[in-house]
Image: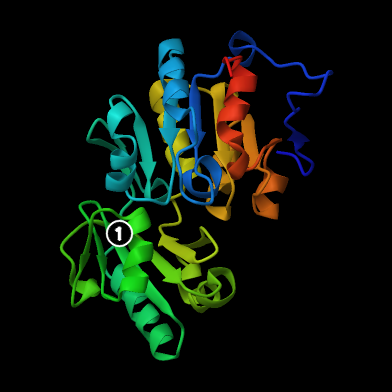
Amino acid sequence: MSSAPSPLLTDTDPSATVPSVGCAGIRLIVTDMDGTLLDDAKRIPPGLWGTLAELRRRGVLFSPASGRQYATLAREFAEVAAGMVFIAENGTYVVRDGAELSSDPLEPGVPAGVVQAVRRLAAGGVDVGAVVCGKRSAYVERGDEAFLAEVRKYYVEHRVVEDATAVDDDVIKIALFDFGSAEHTTAPALAPFAATHQVVVSGEHWVDVMNRTANKGAALRRLQDELGITPAQTMVFGDYLNDLEMLDAAEWSFAMANAHPDVVARARHLAPSNNDNGVLRTIARVLGLEA
């Protein structure tokens, strides 16, 4: 970990020395999605499918790690999902080939308490809604199109229910969407839960409530142990506060140029921004892939 991450040398820098895959020894690449792999328009970067095919040929496992639900990630990568590990719901649910590798569900009573807190916020004038994230589906009480449009981006499997405190599912996370500033409005209002659980700002408008033991980094470390892969053989990309622990689990940790300042400070290296195809450009340079 370094407070001054080294920049990724540009292609025009004559002093750039690009380590080969043999030198880097990378066996696992893990990347956040929004603000990291995807550009600001939520588009898959050009060249991703070719890069994934080459990584597979070299025996390098590629794993998306996101606050998005498993069903959403699986749909995004449907054509190449075989053998891929999906670290979904900010590490609370990890799946490979449809089989659960690990999960960290909330204890009974916590989801209802968070939903009730959100109801109080909304009654006080905050434009906010809760997404109760289960293994099978996500559940919301708000049915207005503006809110559902945001939910659809991350939760392809979702249901509008009358009472989100009474869903019959293993709840692994509560996600809150705040049309204002999640970091300055919704997150502080959830301070009572922060005493016993994680309250993580995962984007400009999103806050997640999870078990203290749940994060992308914990899920990644379990995966490394299961596969016999070390931090020195792991490359990670992230841009926001829910990526911090994941960066700690890899020696090849990259903050995007557009990342939150705390993420930049935590990472060892700096990659080009998500809008400059930073993840694929960095993979190509470090592993010596053809451009």
Give the image quarter of residue 75.
top left
Q: Is residue 45 above or below residue 209?
A: above
Q: Point out the residue furthest to the left here.
A: 168
Residue 67 horizontal/vertical position (percent): 42, 51
Residue 23 horizontal/vertical position (percent): 64, 11
Question: What secondary structure is marked by label 1?
Answer: strand
Left or right, 105 with respect to 137, comes to right
Q: Point out the residue furthest to the top here.
A: 22
The residue nearer to you, when weighing 33 against 109, is 33
The residue nearer to you, when weighing 222 against 50, is 50
The residue nearer to you, when weighing 84 against 47, is 47
Colour logic: rainbow
Q: Residue at x 42, y 77 (%)?
A: 128
Give the image quarter of residue 73.
top left
The residue nearer to you, when weighing 283 against 253, is 283
Q: Work out whether residue 110 can be spotted.
A: no
Q: Residue at x 54, y 49 (%)?
A: 35
The amino acid sitting under disc 1 is Cys
Q: Residue at x 49, y 32 (%)?
A: 46
Q: Is residue 24 above or below residue 118?
A: above
Left or right, 160 with respect to 18, comes to left
Q: Residue at x 32, y 59 (%)?
A: 152
Q: Which quadrant of the rendered structure holds the C terminus?
A: top right
Q: Which quadrant of the rendered structure holds the N terminus?
A: top right
- Number of marks present in the image shown: 1
Q: Work out whether residue 210 can be spotted.
A: yes
Q: Is residue 285 above or below residue 195?
A: above
Residue 289 horizontal/vertical position (percent): 57, 15
Left or right, 48 with respect to 26, comes to left
Q: Which residue is mark 1?
A: 133
Mark 1: few/some/many CA within 10 Å (<14, 14-19, 20+) = many
Give the image quarter of residue 52.
top left
